[in-house]
Amino acid sequence: MGLTLFRFKFILILLVIIILLLFCSIGILKVLNFHRGGLRLINNCVSFKSSLLKGHTQLPKIETCQKSDFIRDLWLGRWTRYGKNDGCQISNDGRYRCLAPDFPCQSPWCSGSLGLLESNGWVYSSHCSFRLFSADSAWNCLKNRWIFFWGDSNHVDTIRNMLNFVLDLPQIPSVPRRFDMNFSNPNDASQNVRITSIFNGHWNETLNYEGFNSLADEGFRNLLKKYFSEDTLPDTIIMNSGLHDGVHWRNLRSYTAGADYAASFWKEVMDSVRQRGLAVPHIFYRTTVATGGYARTLQFNPNKMEVYNWVALEKFRQAGLVTGVIDDFDMTFPWHFDNRCNDGVHYGRGPAKMKWRDGEIGHQYFVDLMLAHVLLNAMCSK
């Protein structure tokens, strides 16, 4: 009886999937995967989704993210879409201005202006929804603050995208792997933010594939310690590691030892801050992206990175370092099956009207831009 019931349920699920595929044209299901133990379907057929929403379907009760929402380690979010410009063309500067800048978010999926995300209607939400920041609101949050980034080169893209798209500083075409700079609001010179970014792919910023092992170099450790020996300290630290670790650490046992050492190093740094009677910065751990397209079969493949993410997070939590988590693995996973939104290992490369890795002209950069807004939610929420 039990086996018969199981077969019936399996056949029923299979029929539903077949009906969905027949109902819409090829490509309605942007993603069909067994991610984190559950079948996830992301529907890319606007007409089908709209017909569901017009019925009696209850929308999930999610609220705008507060500070406490970032305590959760594992996010099980979704990308939803409403508002689509079928005639949208890439501009000469490589951008997709498909919706008006003031095109509003739809509750409960986000708040603010969805058009600023340049996603042609897509937006990410999880156990809570995110505020999309205008330049004024972002500057009001970040003014007179110091943000410290430590991680791989995805940080470089996220910082540049935050400067260009959110903070209204389009004249900055790139930022280096290692820098410490002050940026001013172009509309209010009294508002400044200090951003420091230290690449951890290698102790030599021009090289790669060390990850946590970059801390084996004494000069690199001293460089990091220097920023936390000043009278003024960063308000927030955004940490990440993973892609370079995937190449360096060949197995989970060796990576666990590397993560242990990294956690003990940062604990020592934060303990030294406490001993001087100063406030310890808020530390947010950003999980590593799900590598996309061709990179899914390389040494930093998504299966490996997901495990490495949670080992690192566990070690940093045990050391008492983590204020909150930003699960960028969950954000990027639905888009990792091809290279439309990534070059394999980066989701935020600058807009460009040129042939992309998948042969199409231009690429989508909104996934990383969404991350920039999520980081602002983490830093600015009360």
Image (spheres, rainbow, N blue to C red):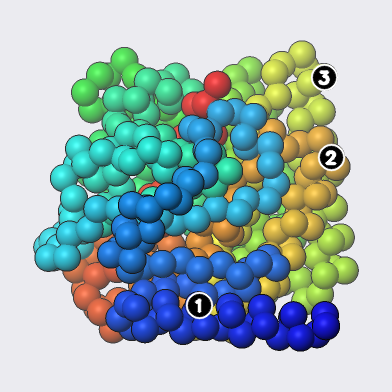
Res 50 → quadrant = bottom left
Sequence-first disc among 2 and 1: 1
Residue topped by disc 1: 16
**Rendered view: 81 above or below 171:** below
Residue 132 on image: x %, y %: 37, 37
From mark 3 to mark 1, how far is it between C-alphas? 61 Å
Q: Residues within 10 Å of mark 2 (few under 14, many from 20)?
A: some
Residue 275: mark: 3
Residue 194 picture quarter:
top left
Where disc 1 sits, the SS reads helix
Q: Nearer the viewer, mark 2 or mark 3?
A: 2
Q: Position of residue 176 (x, y in %)?
A: 43, 52
Q: Nearer the viewer, mark 2 or mark 1?
A: 1
Question: Going from the N terminus, do you reach mark 2 or mark 3 first?
Answer: 3
**Residue at which label 2 appears:** 319
Kind of residue at disc 1: Val
Tell me, yes or no, if residue 220 can be seen here. Answer: no
Residue 319 in the image, given as x and y percentages of width and height? 84, 40
- Foreground of the two, 118 or 103: 103
Q: Secondary structure at mark 3?
A: helix
Three-letter amino acid code of the residue under disc 3: Gln
